[in-house]
Image: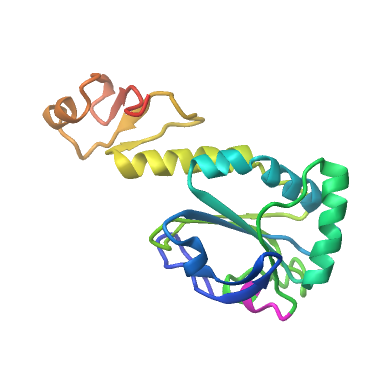
Amino acid sequence: MSLRLGDTAPDFTAETTEGTITFHEWIGDNWAILFSHPKDFTPVCTTELGEVAKLKSAFDQRSVKPIGLSVDPLDSHEAWNRDIEETQGCGVNFPMIADPERKVAELYDMIHPNADATATVRTVFIIDPNKKIRLSLTYPQTAGRNFEEILRVIDSMQLTDRYKVSTPVNWKHGEDVIIVPALSDDQAKELFPKGFKTLKPYLRYTPNPDA
């Protein structure tokens, strides 16, 4: 199943390290990050899970709920978590889906046979409170994911949902943003009382409205 931006994230019921969940119900009115791992006791993913656990407060501030997945069973997840806590200094503090029958992996097209016929690729889905897929990323098994970048994109999406703006290259929270071209200058003056700088008629910068 090919999933695209704007599609409704498929719902499912699954066993996790924090009990049985129904995905849409679990998300509730929050944002969610669903990210997969090829299998338990893999080195790169060990570092990633520790990092996401350390970023819990950052995700909480943004009303984002992370959830991991691998095709191994619950008892394997629990044993792996002991290694994660020992080596990364923080145990997993969010649910990990056990998907030994690969039901969720297939639902989200996480198995790419040309990469690995049985293990999931390392994907990331960011899902908004309306259960719409807002971002998807697929990484090779050898490259660790950058969760600071994932937080940056969440900041961008949450800001641009509230205001008629886009965020420029390498933007970080608090920096200037771009007014969408569909707005006239008169409309922009009304919506952005801090003013704006015009480089081209289609390229107008304004201070971050939330700053």
Q: Position of residue 41 (x, y in %)?
A: 86, 59
Tell me the quarter of the picture where residue 69 sits: bottom right
Verify whether residue 103 appears in magenta: yes
Q: Nearer the viewer, residue 64 or 165?
A: 64
Q: Nearer the viewer, residue 60 or 203?
A: 60
Q: Residue at x 20, y 22 (%)?
A: 193
In the rendered view, how is the structure colored? rainbow
Q: Residue at x 79, y 46 (%)?
A: 47
Q: Position of residue 30 (x, y in %)?
A: 45, 54
| Residue occupying the far front of the picture | 19
Q: Is residue 34 left or right of residue 97?
A: left
Q: Which residues are magenta?
A: 101-105
Q: Position of residue 44 (x, y in %)?
A: 80, 49
Q: Is residue 115 above or below residue 118?
A: above
Chief secondary structure of the magenta portion: helix
Tell me the quarter of the picture where residue 118 sits: bottom right
Q: Is residue 200 above or below residue 145?
A: above
Q: Is residue 171 left or right of residue 79?
A: left
Q: Is residue 148 left or right of residue 45?
A: left
Q: Nearer the viewer, residue 120 or 174?
A: 174
* Quarter of the picture holding the C terminus: top left
Q: Is residue 46 left or right of residue 138?
A: right
Q: How many marks?
A: 0
Q: Is residue 205 above or below residue 89?
A: above
Q: Nearer the viewer, residue 135 or 199?
A: 135
The answer to whether any part of residue 135 appears in the image is: no
Verify whether residue 34 appears in magenta: no
The answer to whether any part of residue 7 appears in the image is: yes
Q: Residue at x 75, y 71 (%)?
A: 71
Q: Position of residue 1 (x, y in %)?
A: 54, 75
